[in-house]
């Protein structure tokens, strides 16, 4: 049993009691952009609650949790406590079909979330992907601070965080105040040598260029800075 509670009622003899029990056979499906934090928190939280988790990380970064689990075994965790797999998404969905998990913890996009929910009849807890906006209206103030915040939200941790700024809508008054140039100046100071940005491991230059070119085909689009 894990974290039960009792609350007194509003008259004699009345109480509210809650009992939480492990699900047992569960799965954790974790994303690529948090190769250690998310799967470690969810997998070991599951273990502490008395469950037997199967862990599936994104294949590109699965080596991070493989090493983490080896360290956990070195520190005393029985190797049989966690099932760790490294396979394609199709193979994972096949396992979900046949394994009869009592609960699945999934972090990722809505399409896969819906597919898992249908396969499991809703036995899934979803931490959905974030898409964060900034909207800068006609009133301009604290331009330097807003530019600094935008740079931090977009590029800090190489953009791999739930609060990453995905899109910014800017009134022309902010453009006249130099917000774009200020963000460009801050972003240009980031480099791998001073550890203010990390290397891109999962995309190559060809695909990045292809994506930029496709975006530039949109009407009235332009590349403000960067792109190389």
Image: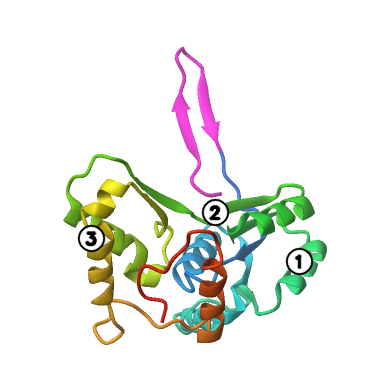
Residue 10 in magenta stretch: yes
Precedes in sequence: disc 2 or disc 3 = 2
Q: Which residue lies at the image location 68% right of the left edge and 59% below the top edge?
A: 112
Q: Report the span colored magenta.
A: 1-18
Front position among marks 2 and 3: 3
Residue 53 placement: quadrant:
bottom right
Counting labels gives 3
Element type at marker 1?
helix
Element type at marker 2?
strand
Precedes in sequence: disc 1 or disc 3 = 1
Residue 158 drawn at (x, y percent): 38, 72
Residue 122 drawn at (x, y percent): 72, 47
Element type at marker 3?
helix
The tag on residue 93 is 1
Asked if the residue at tag 3 contacts the one at tag 2, i.e. Cβ–Cβ closer than 8 Å, the answer is no
Residue to which mark 3 is pinned? 148
Front position among marks 1 and 3: 3
């Amino acid at each position: 049993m894990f974290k039960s509670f009792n609350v007194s009622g509003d008259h004699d003899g009345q109480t509210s009691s809650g009992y939480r029990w492990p699900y047992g056979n569960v799965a954790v499906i974790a994303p690529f952009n948090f190769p250690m934090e998310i799967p470690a928190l969810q997998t070991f939280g599951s273990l502490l609650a008395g469950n037997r988790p199967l862990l599936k990380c994104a294949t590109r970064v699965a080596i991070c949790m493989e090493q983490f689990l080896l360290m956990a075994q070195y520190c005393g965790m029985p190797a049989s406590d966690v099932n760790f797999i490294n396979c394609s998404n199709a193979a994972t969905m096949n396992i979900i079909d046949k394994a009869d998990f009592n609960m699945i913890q999934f972090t990722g996009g809505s399409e896969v979330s819906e597919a898992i929910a249908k396969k499991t009849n809703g036995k899934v807890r979803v931490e959905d992907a974030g898409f964060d906006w900034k909207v800068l209206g006609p009133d301009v103030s604290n331009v330097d601070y807003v530019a600094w915040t935008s740079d931090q939200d977009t590029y800090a941790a190489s953009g791999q965080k739930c609060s990453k700024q995905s899109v910014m809508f800017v009134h022309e008054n902010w453009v006249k105040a130099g917000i774009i140039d200020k963000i460009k100046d801050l972003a240009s100071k980031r480099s791998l040598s001073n550890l203010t940005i990390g290397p891109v491991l999962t995309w190559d230059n060809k695909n990045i260029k292809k994506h930029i070119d496709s975006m530039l085909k949109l009407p009235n689009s332009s590349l403000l800075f960067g792109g190389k």
